[in-house]
């Protein structure tokens, strides 16, 4: 396993060695352009070119004072029939913070989110998601090696996930004004002046 730490997003996790890591910082959320959405993707590819892995999202700010309110806000855009199929499991903790797990039903249209764990910390919402983009298998889906690998990585991330202090970008000091010297005037000696004759009439 390999340690990954992001002081910018405020968390650290362990992920399988050899997995690709990609980062998206300060992008607008697709469901709410007024919120910022940061993401770190940990991805692997099987021999057929299928992708699987897990993602850690950080939404800022979190919506709701409790994890229950926050999850309900996240699910508000789904149709009622879709919300009813999502199972939730509460009273969990991630690094000491209250968390809730969402289990999505298998679907041939959406293979990108099957398990999600949401937690609130320091005013932001963190969503840990395991996903795979492989051909849909209605029977024995968790027996597929990619699924087992993604689930194992997800469980490792849950055990190793910790919050770290967010590194703030230091504010540069204001510029110091540069002193401008006051120009001095030196009178020209009269002996060096050239006499000027009378001015004639203008034509």
Image (cartoon, rainbow, N blue to C red):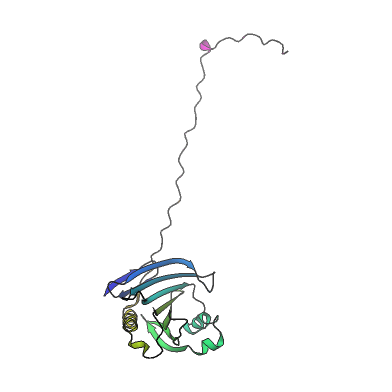
Residue 109, position in %: x, y? 47, 81
Name the residue: 33% across, 70% down. 20
Residue 59, position in %: x, y? 47, 73
In the image, residue 56 above or below residue 172: below
In the image, residue 47 above or below residue 203: below
Judging depth in this view, the residue of 82 and 175 nearest the camera is: 82
Judging depth in this view, the residue of 4 and 164 nearest the camera is: 4
Residue 29, position in %: x, y? 50, 71
Find residue 145 and report its image quarter. Answer: bottom left
Find residue 104 and report its image quarter. Answer: bottom left
Quarter of the figure with the N terminus: bottom left
Residue 154, position in %: x, y? 34, 81
Find residue 100 and report its image quarter. Answer: bottom left
Name the residue: 43% across, 57% down. 171
Does the magenta-highlighted stretch encompass residue 191?
yes
Does the magenta-highlighted stretch encompass residue 125?
no
Name the residue: 38% across, 65% down. 167
Name the residue: 43% across, 66% down. 25
- Taking the image as shown, residue 121 lies to the left or right of residue 47, namely right
Q: Main secondary structure of the magenta part?
A: loop
Q: In the rendered structure, which segment of residues is drawn in magenta?
A: 176-202
Q: Residue furthest right?
A: 203
Judging depth in this view, the residue of 191 and 33 nearest the camera is: 33
């Amino acid at each position: 396993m390999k340690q990954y730490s992001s002081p910018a997003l405020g968390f650290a996790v362990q992920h399988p060695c050899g997995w690709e890591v990609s980062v998206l910082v300060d992008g607008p959320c697709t469901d709410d352009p007024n919120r910022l959405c940061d993401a770190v993707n940990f991805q692997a590819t099987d021999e057929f070119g299928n992708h699987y892995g897990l993602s850690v999202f950080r939404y800022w700010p979190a919506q709701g004072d409790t994890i229950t309110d926050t999850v309900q806000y996240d699910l508000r855009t789904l149709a009622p029939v879709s919300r009813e199929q999502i199972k939730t499991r509460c009273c969990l903790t991630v690094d000491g913070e209250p968390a809730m797990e969402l289990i999505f039903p298998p679907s041939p249209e959406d293979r990108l989110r099957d398990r999600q764990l949401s937690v609130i910390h320091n005013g932001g919402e963190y969503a840990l998601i395991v996903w795979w983009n492989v051909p849909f298998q209605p029977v024995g889906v968790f027996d597929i090696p990619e699924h087992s690998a993604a689930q194992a990585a997800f469980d490792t991330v849950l055990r190793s996930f910790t919050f770290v202090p967010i590194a703030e970008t230091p504010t540069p000091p204001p510029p110091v004004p540069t002193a401008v010297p006051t120009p001095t005037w030196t009178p020209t000696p009269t002996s060096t002046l050239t006499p000027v004759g009378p001015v004639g009439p203008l034509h």
